[in-house]
Amino acid sequence: MLDNNKQPVIGLFVTCLADLYRPEVVFASIKLLEAAGCRVEVPQSQTCCGQPAFNTGDFSNTADIARLTITALEGYEYVVGPSGSCIGMLHHYPELFQPEDPWHARALALKARAFEITSFLVDVLQFSNIQSQFKGKVTYHDSCSGLRELGIKQQPRALLSQIEGVELTEMEESETCCGFGGTFCVKYADISNRMVGNKTDNVAKTGAQTLLGGDLGCLLNMAGKLQREGKDVQVRHVVEVLADQLSHPALGESAYHLGKSL
Amino acid sequence: MQITSPQFKENARIALTDVGLQKALGNVKTGFPQKRANAVARLPEFDQLRDQGRDLKNHIIANLDIYLEEFEANVIKNGGHVHWCRTSEDARQTILKICQDKGAKTVTKGKSMVTEEINLNEHLEANGITPIETDLGEYILQLRGEHPSHIIAPAIHLNLEDVSETFHAHHNKPKSMDPAVLMQEAREELRARFVAADVGITGANFLVAETGSSIIVTNEGNGDLTQTLPKTHIVVTSIEKVVPTLEDMTLFLRLLARSATGQEFTVYNTLSTGPKRPEDQDGPEDYHVVLVDNGRSDMVGGELQDMLRCIRCAACMNHCPVYGAIGGHSYGWVYPGPMGSVLTPQMIGIEKAALLPNASTFCGKCESVCPVHIPLPKLMRHWRKNEFERHLTPKAARWGIKTWAFFAKRPSLYRLLSQTSNRMLRLLGGKKGRIHKLPMVSGWTDHRDMPVPSSKTFMQQWNEKQKAGH
């Protein structure tokens, strides 16, 4: 799909959770995109996609944040981010503006260029040169927004299958929500707890040592539950494995034993 | 029925610890979704039918008045009567009057959610008329004094033991745990009621404009006995059920059976077209259709219009992980699950139903299985917007989102906030890499640990690297 002589320029959508919680996910994304022949830039005026406001019903603030994000990400051939949920939110932007509003056209233009990372690597770049020394039995959680809003299902699996050491065992109900749901997990804590408990049971049944996924919200939720239950499963974003960026601890695990400090 | 939607969270908490309910809900999770998936797999053009169903429903809603008037004209031509009821109260009074005019003592009922919606049974009872539910699930619930927890499988929250005990307490028979024996008991009890009833009340799955017919689908045949044996048949249904032609009806029957129970076709598909004609061997002498609006016409042309496409198949709740965790009664009114979280606020008011449209992770599973592509998450989000605009959102959440948005709109400040939060979380996490208890987010830490950031924010690290000339 890409012109071989031209290096695509990517505006990286960092996503607020990766920025705050897991910078390694962003570095891994950059590494993968560069390995696939892209030039990556990090637009400085980006913040969050606005999904918390959108799903709380605060459409006015959502539209303000959308305008900021659209502006920040304009001028890039592609916009790529390590989250189906956040990229899915960028795809919702046109709903926020009336068709006659100039921002509507700009939102549509962003939607057409915005991709979740595994889908960008597979669907747009047809990238098939994953280099990773990772070894182990993994299972994969399909995060809802990526799965149902962006059609992300086989892309991460296609990439993982290129790693010799990866043994993927599918869990039961891999497409069922983990119960995160943004503020849902705090507002409806009991229901969310039941949902994440079902999920960690299914994860544990696979016998996998590592749980992978493409969205940090879900991964934080499942990691926290696995650790509370004392289930010995490491949780990582799929790009960490794909980019062979594994020197840092898994989610919610201590850096101390690796000799790092604050 | 008593509305307990404002206590949704408390209802849910109780439901989550109800052993019997949880056992019963386990059957929902494994039963309906698998049956639907199998049925869909057997029909390659299922998705095309869904598109057709959506488009046809949109056309009907845009021309609702025309098709309803055509339906009415044909019912009258067939010798029946049509009653237009704007509110539940209008509908209750209309039905009561028909029953009283007939001097009715007992009324048999086929399964009907609209009669639940208008609270018909209590109204009849208060006026000395005994309603008898004839759908097996509804019959069990009536003996127990309960309401349906699901729109097509009303007693899905019960287990065999519950039914056994209930029948033992009400029927003069030895206790049995054999479903076939229990079924036979119910059949014997109901048979005499069918024959004795003065009026039969059914709902309608669809109304056919071109013929003036109503149709009900059942798997028990109770609907047939309810509508053919008594001298008077009253169809109680809502205005969006109308379809133009019999052929259109068959499209929806194909979608409905597969989406609901995973059947190719429901066992009994029974059409009623007016009262008994001279050449008919049986059938009612009087045929009435009570058309209930109850807020539906207000949805035409508005942001909730897509919801009028609903054919009440229950696929959304069968696939909903929230419904699957807490069951239908937690929602606190007639319609549970995702479709209920959209409809209930319209019918009982968003003030009472405020918690329902928020009780979703927006996982989108409901929309993905809806036979007429209703964008349920979008419609629930519409209610959240409505709540936010009307200051019904809880103060803490409102204040929280506004404060957060203040930062999110200012990139430099936002980065400072991220850096500060990042550092604080890492300090709180200490050597463990996660937090066990954090009172500010006890909803999270009551049930799970909170992982803390692995290092400084990405933006900090990136900009340091850029400065260092990487």
Image (cartoon, coloured by chain):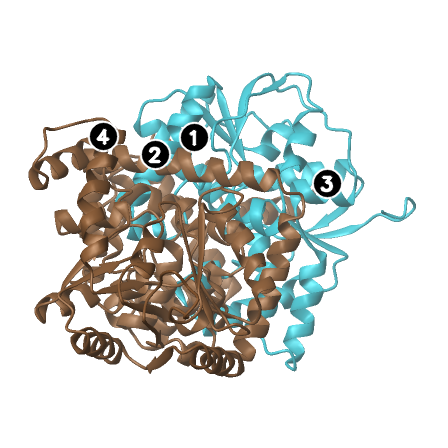
Kind of residue sitting beneath label 3: Leu
The residue that label 4 is drawn on is B181
Question: Disc 3 on helix, strand or loop?
Answer: helix
Q: Residues within 10 Å of mark 1 (few under 14, many from 20)?
A: few
Kind of residue sitting beneath label 2: Asn
Compared to B139, does B292 lie above or below?
below
| The label number, if any, that marks residue B164 in the structure image | none
Residue at the extreme front: B279
Q: Colour of chain A?
A: cyan
- Please check whether the numbered discs 3 and 2 fall on a single chain: no
In the rendered structure, the residue with mark 2 lies on which chain?
B
Cβ atoms at labels 4 and 2 below 8 Å apart:
no
The residue that label 1 is drawn on is A261
Q: Residues within 10 Å of mark 3 (few under 14, many from 20)?
A: many
In the rendered structure, the residue with mark 4 lies on which chain?
B
Task: Determine the CA span between mark 4 and mark 2.
Answer: 21 Å
